Image (cartoon, grey):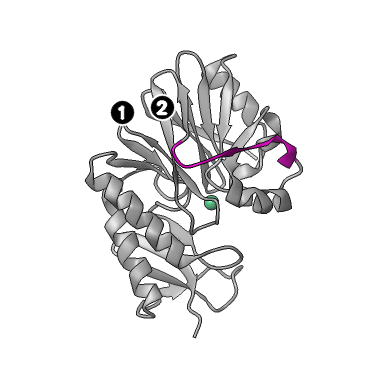
Amino acid sequence: MEFTVTQVDKNIWAIDQQGVRSFLLVGEDGAILIDTCFGGDLASVCRELCGDKPVTLLTTHADPDHIGGDGQFPAQYLHLADFLRYEAVSKHSAHAKPLAEGNTFTAGEFTLEVVYIPGHTPGSVAFLDRKHKFLIAGDTVQNGSVFMFGEGRDLRAYLESVKKLEDLRQEGAFDTVYASHGVSRISADILPDLIALAQELLAGKGTPVGPAPDRFPPSVKTYRHGRAQMFFEQVM
Ligand SMILES: [Zn+2]
């Protein structure tokens, strides 16, 4: 599986593979890799971008399109609440180390703070760089379709999490989001649309704008509010 590498800001690289994306932040003394797509030789891609610098692997959540290349790195940090999910889809769960709200990881100029945002999965987290004012939030914040149906999804928790992120945005903690799907670098002002969409769906008020892709159960529909879009199954 091929990778497409794009520089999205100074010392920040997007690594795309079949509709999903990892990010590599390269500091003077080391690098931080966020997620590992479906698999493939991501270690070589990282070496080309950061040489022999040590790479710390952080995981936004344990869905298969975010952990596929995990075995190539000495350790993998993810939230405890996603450990079971991770064990179910990976042969390398022995590499897993826990991270939690408020932990920080540093590589040169980049310091990433863990923000716990359950909902899309029980152990979803975002990584906040307050100095550079960006957030890496996996699937939770994106202008592609947020998957909110199936095992482990919790729309109520998701709503609380996006509200928590919106509070941080209002405080000025970040204004840019690097997203795993859709456009790689988006404005954080998409958050009110995500909040509104989640509120509509929880109130049973969302109107489907179309079917979801054929590979999903027929009861899953596409919902939209402004720039926010979700695949969701309205339970009657
Ligand atoms: Zn994903």
Element on which disc 2 rests: strand
Compared with 86, 33 (above or below) is above
Q: Tell me, yes or no, if residue 36 can be seen here.
A: no
* Quadrant placement of the N terminus: top right
Name the residue: 58% across, 70% down. 214
Name the residue: 56% across, 15% down: 53
Residue type at mark 2 is: Thr
Say if 30 sits above or below 92 in the image: above
What residue is shown at x 43% (from left), y 45% (from top)? 137
How packed mark 2 is, by other alpha carbons closer than 10 Å (few <14, some 14-19, many 20 or more), is some
Query: Ligand 1 closer than 8 Å to the CB at disc 2?
Result: no
Residue 161 in percent (x, y) is at 40, 55
For the magenta stretch, what is the residue range?
92-102
The local crowd at label 1, few if under 14, some if 14 to 19, many if 20 or more residues have their Cα within 10 Å, is few
Report the side of 24 relative to 94 (left or right): left
Q: Secondary structure at mark 1?
A: loop
Decide whether residue 121 is among the magenta residues: no
Residue farthest to the right, as pictured = 91
x, y percent for residue 158: 43, 60
Q: Amino acid at mark 1?
A: Lys
Total count of labels: 2
Q: Is residue 94 magenta?
A: yes
The relative height of residue 208 versus residue 100 in the rendered view (above or below) is: below
Residue at point 28% right, 50% down? Answer: 167
Q: CA distance from mark 1 to mark 2?
A: 8 Å
The residue that label 2 is drawn on is: 111
Q: Quadrant of residue 203?
A: bottom left
Residue 195 position within the rendered picture, expressed as x and y whole percent measured from the top left: 32, 62
Residue named by callout 1: 131
Q: Could you tell which of marks 1 and 2 lies nearer the N-terminus? A: 2
Say left or right for 83 vs 26: right
Does mark 1 have its CB less than 8 Å from ligand 1?
no
